[in-house]
């Protein structure tokens, strides 16, 4: 069997001066990971938290400014009630257990999505975590919770309509609409990572990833390690970014 490249070997190939400013991740494959092992789906979600910790710590160590993780979509409410309840419990567990680590690593937590529709207990733990990391100025870790890009655009149009009612002469352009999105104040992702081999965006940051480089791996999320992240960064740095150019020259 071919030996996997070591962490040191991968790190040596990364130019720390050309890191993406913002990495977004669609964390997919927890259920399939559990099914392959004949385990309940919640075991896959719990294993996925270990992958979250690795990626967050690696981004903080490298000096990546922004990391956004697709943690719970608006469509995920359609899953069995028991699974949703357990997912919310895992989220609360993460928020409580990892705050100390986030503070030690100078990581500031953020959240995007329709947060007001989450269970009250989850909202309380989220707010506590946001408050406790508010003064940190290292990696900005954003969790997309009860998030859907189409819902975000609907909410942005509502916000924009309200602004127009107050300021009829408001200029409507891309910058104005961007200011109405959940991600206002955060640069658009440069790199979008998707695990489990699926080739779709799954209603994630549709406006923001217009010019992002996309990196897909067949690896299921619970098996995703910092070395996979390093491989994504190496591939990203080999690409010539065209920002909308069609490459016809």
Image (tube, grey):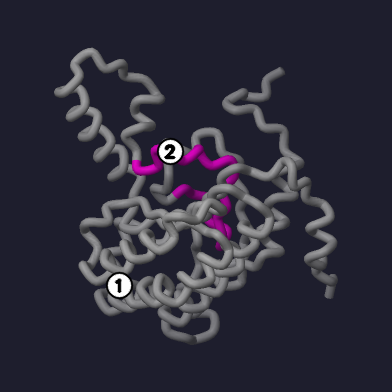
- The picture places residue 21, in percent across and down from the top left corner, at 60, 42
Residue under label 1, please give it. 84
Extent of the magenta region:
182-201
- How many residues crowd mark 1 within 10 Å: few (<14), some (14–19), many (20+)? some
- How many residues crowd mark 2 within 10 Å: few (<14), some (14–19), many (20+)? few
Residue at point 55%, 60% (across, down) = 106
Instruction: Tell which of 128 and 88 is nearer to you.
Output: 128
Residue projecting furthest to the top:
169
- The picture places residue 219, in percent across and down from the top left corner, at 62, 65
Residue 36's tag is none
Q: Is residue 181 above or below residue 78?
A: above
Q: Is residue 13 left or right of residue 164?
A: right
Q: Secondary structure at mark 1?
A: helix
Q: Is residue 113 above or below residue 89?
A: above
Residue at point 61%, 58% (across, down) = 60
Residue under label 2, please give it. 185
Instruction: Tell which of 48 and 219 is nearer to you.
Output: 48
Instruction: Tell which of 244 and 113 is nearer to you.
Output: 113
Q: Which quadrant: the C terminus?
A: top right
């Amino acid at each position: 069997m071919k030996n996997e490249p070591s962490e040191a070997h991968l790190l040596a190939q990364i130019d720390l001066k050309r890191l993406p400013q913002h990495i977004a991740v669609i964390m997919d494959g927890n259920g399939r990971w559990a099914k392959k092992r004949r385990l309940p789906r919640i075991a896959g979600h719990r294993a996925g938290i270990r992958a979250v910790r690795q990626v967050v710590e690696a981004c903080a160590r490298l000096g990546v400014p922004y990391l956004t993780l697709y943690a719970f979509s608006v469509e995920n409410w359609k899953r069995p009630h028991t699974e949703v309840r357990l997912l919310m419990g895992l989220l609360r567990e993460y928020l409580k257990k990892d705050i100390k680590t986030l503070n030690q690593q100078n990581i500031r937590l953020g959240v995007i999505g329709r947060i007001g529709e989450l269970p009250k207990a989850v909202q309380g733990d989220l707010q506590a975590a946001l408050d406790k990391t508010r003064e940190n100025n290292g990696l900005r870790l954003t969790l997309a919770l009860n998030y859907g890009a189409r819902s975000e655009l609907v909410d942005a149009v509502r916000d924009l309509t309200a602004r127009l009612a107050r300021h009829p002469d408001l200029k409507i352009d891309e910058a104005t609409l961007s200011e109405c999105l959940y991600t206002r104040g955060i640069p658009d992702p440069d790199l979008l990572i998707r695990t489990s081999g699926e080739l779709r965006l799954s209603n994630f940051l549709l406006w923001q990833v217009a010019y992002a480089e996309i990196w897909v791996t067949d690896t299921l999320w619970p098996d995703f390690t910092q070395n996979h992240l390093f491989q994504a960064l190496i591939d990203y740095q080999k690409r010539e970014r065209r920002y909308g150019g069609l490459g016809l020259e």
